Amino acid sequence: MAANIAGLVSPAVCTVDFSLVPIGAHSASFSRQIADVQRLMQQSGLKYQMHATGTTVEGPWDQVARIIGYSHTLLHQEGIARIQTDIRMITRTDKVKPMEESVVSVERLLAT
């Protein structure tokens, strides 16, 4: 972990839900670009899960931020001039909780 302002460092691990939103695209269809981003996620080696409105990815903060940046660059290279990304980030210091465990916790409650 690299230090930054006042000796602070980024959290070691994060879970991020992100959704890329093309602005000014000529088509409402974005499936090809989503597939390209998913291929990029596969190559990253990070744990991820695509869902109906975005992608959840888990890993070291710097790597997760970098793969989102790469996604922007990839889509810019495909001709999308402007992209907005909605991001929700989760970090924990009290315990390690993989992203799928949050879903399992709720599913257990629903099963009772």
Image: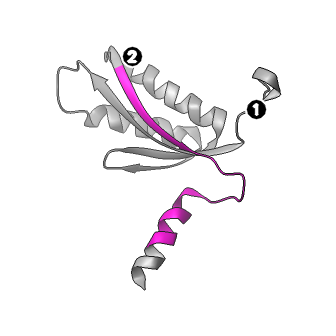
Label for residue 77?
A: 2
Q: Quadrant of residue 3?
A: top right
Exactly how many numbered labels are in the figure?
Answer: 2
**Depth order, front residue of 63/4:** 4
The amino acid beneath tag 1 is Val
* Residue at 34% from the left image edge and 36% from the top image edge: 34
Q: Distance from label 2 to label 1 (Cα)?
A: 32 Å
Which residue is at the far front? 6
Q: Residues within 10 Å of mark 2 (few under 14, many from 20)?
A: few
* Residue at 42% from the left image edge and 40% from the top image edge: 38
In the rendered image, residue 85 lying in the magenta stretch gets the answer: yes
Q: Is residue 83 above or below residue 9?
A: above
Residue position for label 1: 9
Which residue is at the far right? 7
Looking at the picture, how far across and down is residue 31, in whole percent?
26, 37
Question: For the residues carrying marks 2 and 1, which lies nearer the camera in this image?
Answer: 1
**Depth order, front residue of 44/67:** 67
Q: Quadrant of residue 5?
A: top right
Q: Residues within 10 Å of mark 1 (few under 14, many from 20)?
A: few
**Depth order, front residue of 105/57:** 105
* Residue at 63% from the left image edge and 60% from the top image edge: 97
Q: Quadrant of residue 110?
A: bottom left
The segment highlighted magenta reads 83-106
Looking at the picture, how far across and down is residue 6, in whole percent?
80, 23
In the rendered image, residue 92 lying in the magenta stretch gets the answer: yes
